[in-house]
Image (spheres, helix red, strand yellow):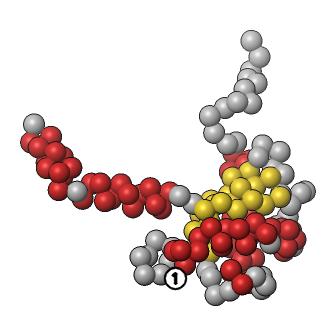
Amino acid sequence: MSRHRHHDRNTTGPSQRQLRAGELIRHALVEVLREEEIHDPALKGVSVTVTEVRLSPDLKHATCFVEPLGAGVADAEVGDHIDEIVKALNGNAKFIRGALGRHIDMKFTPDLRFRHDESFDAASQMDRLFNDPRVRADLERSDED
């Protein structure tokens, strides 16, 4: 048996290389979105957090998960415009990709696709469920057993 094992390409998660490159791109993307002036009415005055970047195995395609700041706040103006903001980012993806290429040192600058990060909504929903009086009563009852 050889000392080197060949890993199955259908592993359950991203490779170390994908994770490192994703973090590199995420940090650079934050700088690009902060520094560059993107001329789109949907993005005017909007701050966007890049929560995660997932890369394809060949590192040529990046899915960027974003959360507009204030989107989870009930009285924030941004909350109703999340789809417009993500659409505007995707519409300006080529411009953002060009600016990103000047910030990173990779063989290829990946194509960018922006998606809204739904994890904040899911966490908020879980908090509401755990704070429901009926669920709380069940949790406290199971703690006593």
Split into 4 quadrants, where in the image is the N terminus? Answer: top right
Up-down: is 87 above or below 4?
below
Q: Does residue 107 appear left or right of residue 55 in this picture? A: right
Residue receiving disc 1: 77
| Of residues 93 and 15, the one drawn nearer to the viewer in this rendering | 93
Name the residue at 55% across, 78% down.
78
Mark 1 belongs to which amino acid? Answer: Glu
Q: Does residue 60 appear left or right of residue 24 in this picture? A: right
| Of residues 44 and 63, the one drawn nearer to the viewer in this rendering | 44
Residue 105's image quarter?
Answer: bottom right
Name the residue at 68% across, 81% down.
43
Name the residue at 67% across, 42% down.
14
Up-down: is 103 above or below 23?
below
Considering every residue shown, the one lying at the far top of the view is 1
Judge whether residue 124 can be spotted in this image: yes
Q: Position of residue 142 (x, y in %)?
A: 15, 40
Up-down: is 39 above or below 50?
below
Considering every residue shown, the one lying at the far left of the view is 144
Q: Position of residue 49 (x, y in %)?
A: 60, 72
Label 1 crowd bin: few (<14), some (14–19), many (20+), radius 10 Å: few
Q: Secondary structure at mark 1?
A: helix
Q: Position of residue 36 (x, y in %)?
A: 77, 83
Q: Position of residue 110 (x, y in %)?
A: 83, 57
Q: How many marks?
A: 1
| Of residues 67 and 35, the one drawn nearer to the viewer in this rendering | 67
